[in-house]
């Protein structure tokens, strides 16, 4: 039985939502802030925490997309080809969560986060290797569609780190700096969270009182961070996010296997 929230809990969840959406708007991995707050701080069961987290952070993804509108001109055409595989993949991921038991869900999370962090860390080497072999550094659009499907499935199943995965795959399929890729990532992340949230709400997997403060915090954090992050050096930003991802991988491995 999940305990009712106290006024302090509401403030903590608001802060977690703001920080998580701020991190998500910059690159991804913000759920690694809000998700542990639900599971460890408020003792919400993992699957319910994940569903509640997805619903709570959806408005932050949208706010982050609005904050990056000034960066999306060169990359917005990718939204036309990626929105459908994004929505379909998210529905599949949400269904997978519904049929996965809690213990299995907890056991595979660290490895999904590790995969996302590795992809982001090796991204510059992948592009350099492709160029050295005489190939274009950016893959064709159809490759972007194929890569987006498993990323969206991952996002619908467990959102933490999906932004990192999208940035890693976008680096191979899109031209643009990290801020321009972030613009696309935030809009597609909004679609992923919206699609899976509809499934989770319909199945009664969401704790509405816990989602409210997350929603309010995510709106603030998503927009503010999307504006501030554009003044940050792109290479330093990428390195910092990769290090953060590895740190969170270690944390989840310790939490799961102890």
Image (cartoon, grey):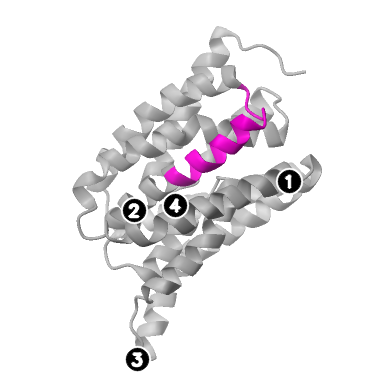
Where does residue 233 sit, x and y in percent of width and height? 27, 54
Q: Are marks 4 and 1 in contact (CB under 8 Å)?
A: no
- At x 60%, y 29%, the residue is 37
Query: To which residue does mark 4 refer?
Result: 241
The answer for how far apart the CA atoms under marks 3 and 4 are is 29 Å
The answer for how far apart the CA atoms under marks 2 and 4 are is 18 Å
Indicate left or right for 37 with 220 as reference: right
Disc 4 on helix, strand or loop?
Answer: helix
Q: Earlier in the sequence, mark 2 or mark 4?
A: 2
Query: To which residue does mark 3 refer?
Result: 134
Q: Earlier in the sequence, mark 2 or mark 3?
A: 3
Q: Nearer the viewer, mark 2 or mark 4?
A: 2
Q: Earlier in the sequence, mark 2 or mark 1?
A: 1
Q: Name the disc covering residue 184, or none.
A: 2
Q: Are marks 3 and 1 in contact (CB under 8 Å)?
A: no
Indicate left or right for 19 with 258 as reference: left
Q: Report if residue 43 is visible in the image.
A: yes
Indicate left or right for 4 with 120 as reference: right
Q: Overall secondary structure of the magenta stretch?
A: helix
Disc 2 on helix, strand or loop?
Answer: helix
Image: 185 above or below 19: below
- Which quarter of the rendering shows the C terminus? top right
Q: Magenta segment, which residues?
A: 191-207
Query: To which residue does mark 1 refer?
Result: 105
Q: Are marks 3 and 4 in contact (CB under 8 Å)?
A: no
Residue 239 is inside the magenta segment: no
């Amino acid at each position: 039985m999940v305990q009712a929230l106290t006024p302090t809990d509401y403030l903590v969840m608001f802060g977690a939502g703001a920080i998580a959406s701020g991190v998500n708007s910059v690159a991804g991995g913000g759920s690694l802030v809000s998700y542990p707050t639900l599971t460890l701080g408020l003792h919400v069961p993992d699957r319910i925490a994940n569903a509640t987290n997805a619903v709570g952070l959806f408005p932050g993804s949208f706010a982050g997309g609005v904050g990056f509108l000034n960066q999306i001109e060169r990359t917005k055409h990718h939204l036309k080809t990626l929105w459908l595989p994004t929505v379909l993949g998210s529905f599949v991921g949400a269904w997978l969560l519904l049929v996965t038991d809690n213990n299995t869900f907890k056991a595979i999370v660290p490895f999904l986060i590790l995969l996302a962090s590795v992809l982001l860390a090796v991204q510059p080497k992948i592009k350099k290797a492709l160029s050295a072999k005489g190939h274009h550094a950016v893959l064709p659009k159809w490759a972007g569609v194929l890569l987006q499907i498993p990323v969206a499935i991952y996002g619908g199943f467990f959102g933490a780190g999906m932004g990192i995965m999208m940035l890693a795959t976008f680096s191979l399929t899109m031209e643009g700096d990290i801020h321009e890729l972030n613009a696309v990532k935030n809009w597609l992340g909004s679609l992923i969270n919206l699609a899976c949230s509809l499934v989770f709400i319909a199945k009664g997997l969401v704790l509405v009182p816990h989602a409210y403060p997350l929603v309010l915090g995510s709106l603030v954090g998503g927009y503010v961070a999307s504006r501030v992050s554009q003044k940050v050096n792109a290479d330093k930003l990428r390195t910092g996010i990769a290090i953060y991802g590895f740190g969170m991988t270690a944390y989840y491995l310790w939490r799961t296997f102890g």
